[in-house]
Image (cartoon, rainbow, N blue to C red):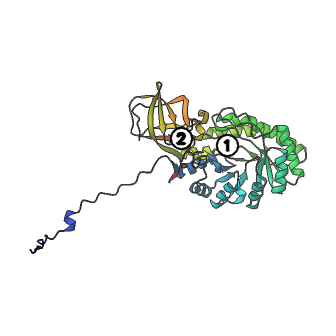
Amino acid sequence: MSLTFQTAPSAPAIDPVAIAPPVAAPVAPVAPTPRLELSVGTAVARYLTLASALPGTAIHYAVKANPHPVLLRALAQAGCRFDVASPTEVRAALDAGAPASHLVHSNPVARRDHLAEAHALGVRLFVVDSPGEVAKLADAAPGSSVLVRIVTSGSGADWPLSRKYGCTVDDAVELLVAAAHLGLDPAGVSFHVGSQQRDPHAWAAPIASAARVFDGVRAAGFHPWLLDLGGGFPARLDGEPLPIADYGRAIDAHLTAAFGTDRPRTLAEPGRGVVGDAGTVVTSVVGVVDRGGSRWVFVDAGVFTGLVETLDEAIRYRLETPGVAGPTGPCVLAGPTCDSADVLYETTPVWLPLSLAEGDELRIHAAGAYSTCYSTVGFNGFAPLPTVIIR
């Protein structure tokens, strides 16, 4: 038996264009959450506002608040100087285009090799607050100018500073005189009134204290010339702060009252006051849980992934839920990690739409400061908060 194979008839020609599916317009990728959206233009505008409110005062942006290189370059190009606290920050400021003469090293208790490295990179202005640090600085950074940090109460600040740094007026006089005897330049005094300072008159007491230090050092035969007003200038968090111009007028009045016509040169070290309003943390709802009558909203940014300043609910950000409306109610806001401390707001809950659900977006405003620098690499497998630059 033979098998016969037949050839299939030829298929008609096909126009590939005629059967191709329509090509959809390209869709812009949606950036993942959580992320920090950082407006460099807003930060530069805030710097210029501060510089205008404090004429004659050198503005040194605190690099620790947000060290993104694009931000630092833009500020340097606008004329801003920098407050640094480590060799890494010194290099970041220099890489941004700032000359070393525009840097102040504000860490009062620093490693000896870090001081030597900063000095080798050209830094010549340092802050100390104890006898051991004066001796260390004289050894590691000979011939440098020194500011002695005095303690403040922190009253009026959302985030009052602890007693970790700062000495008394009498101690400051002794330290500056000792610095002079060790070959350092006893430049003057530094202080900080606390972060997110709500009271423009909080500078009154430390300025008056600084004037007493200057008098004591002059009586010893030396000539201090510089006063560091620190930071503390507020961002627009959950309460509307007074205009920065009010701070400038108050500080100017207190300088005149304390020093008269013999006013020293001044500098300031704003961090949040420059970059806070420039940043928005964008996060997504992970889940909503009812726990004993309390509504818990879990989001993918938390204490360990960008929002460390919510510890003890010290800093309260402005929240927005775009596209989600309707009735609101009190909610506990929690972060995504398994750590029980990863709760943003519980003692004083936040009011959010009751329709908020998994996948909805939550925008956390005025979060440009201290939201990327404290992110913990690898905590529970969560990556540090990435930054999206908005010009």
Q: Which residue, given by chain and number where applicable, does mark 2 sit on?
A: 337
Between the residue at mark 1 and the residue at mark 2, the CA separation in whole angstroms equals: 32 Å
Q: Which residue, given by chain and number where applicable, does mark 1 sit on?
A: 231
Q: Nearer the viewer, mark 1 or mark 2?
A: 2
Dot 2 falls on a residue whose secondary structure is loop
The answer to whether marks 1 and 2 mark residues whose Cβ atoms lie closer than 8 Å is no
Which residue is situated farthest in the left direction here?
1
Q: Residues within 10 Å of mark 2 (few under 14, many from 20)?
A: many
User: Is residue 9 something that shows in the picture?
Assistant: yes
The answer to which of marks 1 and 2 sits earlier in the sequence is 1
Frontmost residue, 97 versus 69: 69
Please identify the quarter of the rendering in which residue 91 is found. bottom right
The residue that appears at 87% across and 51% down in the rendered structure is 180
Frontmost residue, 274 versus 2: 2
Frontmost residue, 153 versus 24: 24
The residue that appears at 66% across and 39% down in the rendered structure is 249
Q: Position of residue 227 (x, y in %)?
A: 76, 45
Left or right of 277 in this view: 284 = left
Q: Amino acid at mark 1?
A: Gly
